[in-house]
Image: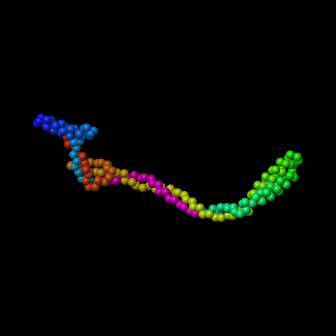
Amino acid sequence: MKRMVLFVVSVAITLVAASPVLAGKRYDPALYDYADVIEVKPIIELVRVDSPRQECWTETHTRYRYSGGHNSYTPEIFGAIVGAAVGNQFGRGRGRELATAAGAVLGGSIGHDVKRRRHRYAYNEPVERCETHHEFHEQEHVVGYKVKYRYGDRIYHSRTGHDPGHRIRVRVHVAPAE
């Protein structure tokens, strides 16, 4: 029984020790400590920034409305009769018939246009217009920090993504010196 318990415990210890290896992680013998920061300098880049500005104004547009007399076809009929009479004065035989028909069509069209002009009313309508103007300027952006720090009796330099403050965390690797 003792052998069985000893076997199970040894297997459990082996599995716990091997779990980082099984999880795809390698053993990291490094220790962590803190070093004193001597100097921090921001790394600055100039970035072109677009500041769109919209400008709007109101314009007045003239619109036309047609009213009254739309249901009456008198101007078209009168124009067709006058056009047919004028067209009948030209040509002989078959040509006279064509000129009469053409005169009637043209006269009816002119009558329609006259009717529309006579009943057209103009009015002004406000319309809002907008334009977007792009103004570009350069801005300074901090993209990182150059850090100078002391650990033990040595000076080190590094680049970080943030200002570490007065102390910076460092990794210390201890190995036998053979």
Q: Which residues are magenta?
A: 40-58
On-image quarter of the N terminus:
top left
Question: Is residue 112 found inside the magenta-colored segment of the image?
Answer: no
Question: Magenta segment: does it hold 45?
Answer: yes
Closer to the camera in the image, 159 or 20 = 20
Instruction: Tell me the residue at 20%/40% (across/down).
Output: 16
Q: Position of residue 40 (x, y in %)?
A: 30, 54
Q: Residue at x 24, y 46 (%)?
A: 171
The count of marks equals: 0
Q: Is residue 158 left or right of residue 46?
A: left
Query: Left of 168 or right of it: where is 64?
Result: right
Image quarter for residue 39? Answer: bottom left
- Which residue is located at x 31 percent, y 54 percent? 163
Q: Nearer the viewer, residue 62 or 32?
A: 62
Q: Give residue 17's position: percent from left, percent from top.
A: 20, 39
User: 69 and 14: which one is in front?
Assistant: 69
